[in-house]
Amino acid sequence: MKITNSIYVLGLSGLVFLGACTASGDHPGYEYAPQMYNSVAYEPLNQIVDESQGSWLSTREDGKGEFFNSNINNPNRMNMREPVANTVPRTKDGALPYRLKAFELEEAAKIENPVELTEQVLAEGRVLYRQYCSTCHGNNGEGDGKAGEVVGGVANLKGGAYIDLPEGHIFHVIMKGKGRMGAHGSQIPQERIWKIVHYVKQEIQKQ
Ligand code: HEC
């Protein structure tokens, strides 16, 4: 009985304690765990330039307030820097960002495969094809993969007009998806997609 009572008292005082945080009238309320609202990390949109803000709870080694989050070393106190003039960003694998939209197939068709065709590249393309494409298109590209049976309407890469698809077109379809096929651009780095394209052109479509 005693234990139940103390749990009851504890719960009640907890409620009273939390209730004191609520805002009402002129009282803005207390912030519980204020670090959740004013992140200590540098943020471009939430600049706290007053070095003493949050000093009452600061544990920082530089002696500044807990909430101070501006970068004093950069212009405008931003954490991000302006990109250097006349430079272009690169993706993680060193490629230029791919900016064509899903419907811009004609433009994509003009792009040439930047990866040199070698035995090694074909071997890698084969592994990647089996990882990412076989499930639907089948090991031989005939559209007979197990998952393809469920998806339905999978293209037979050896059939009809598909044989003549330009490499840039195939790259684009893998990047952006088309019709019932989903986009793979976020899963496969560009260089690897081009290797798959080599494999599709050289091995699957020439058999
Ligand atoms: C989840 C199943 C699935 C996966 C995985 C998949 N595809 Fe497809 N693919 C399809 C379907 C379905 C179509 C038919 C799209 C349509 O026209 O609706 C298609 C169409 C295509 C086409 C023809 C595009 C055109 O212009 O009509 C090519 C080329 C192709 N896929 C290559 C690939 C390659 C290479 C991979 C591996 C990176 C791959 N696909 C992975 C389902 C898949």
Image (cartoon, rainbow, N blue to C red):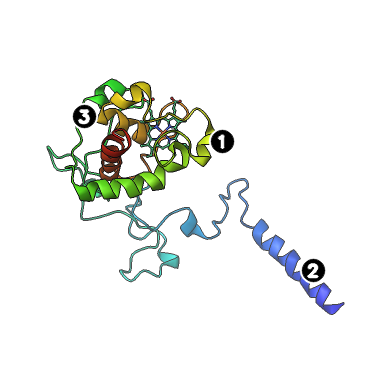
Picture disc at residue 111? 3
Residue 68 drawn at (x, y percent): 35, 57
Residue 92 in view here: no
Occupied quadrant, residue 175: top left
Earlier in the chain: of badge 2 and badge 1, it is 2
Residue 183 drawn at (x, y percent): 40, 35
Residue under pointer 2: 8
Q: 59 or 101: nearer the eye?
A: 101
Residue under pointer 1: 150
Amino acid beneath label 2: Tyr
The residue depicted at 48 percent of the width and 36 percent of the height is 144
Q: CA distance from mark 1 to mark 3?
A: 32 Å
- Circle 1 crowding by C-alpha within 10 Å: few under 14, some 14–19, many from 20: few
Left-right relation of 136 to 175:
right
Earlier in the chain: of badge 1 and badge 3, it is 3
Instruction: Please tell me whether mark 1 sits on a helix, a strand or a loop.
Output: helix
- Circle 2 crowding by C-alpha within 10 Å: few under 14, some 14–19, many from 20: few
Q: Quadrant of the N terminus?
A: bottom right
Instruction: Please tell me whether mark 3 sits on a helix, a strand or a loop.
Output: loop
The residue depicted at 18 percent of the width and 42 percent of the height is 117
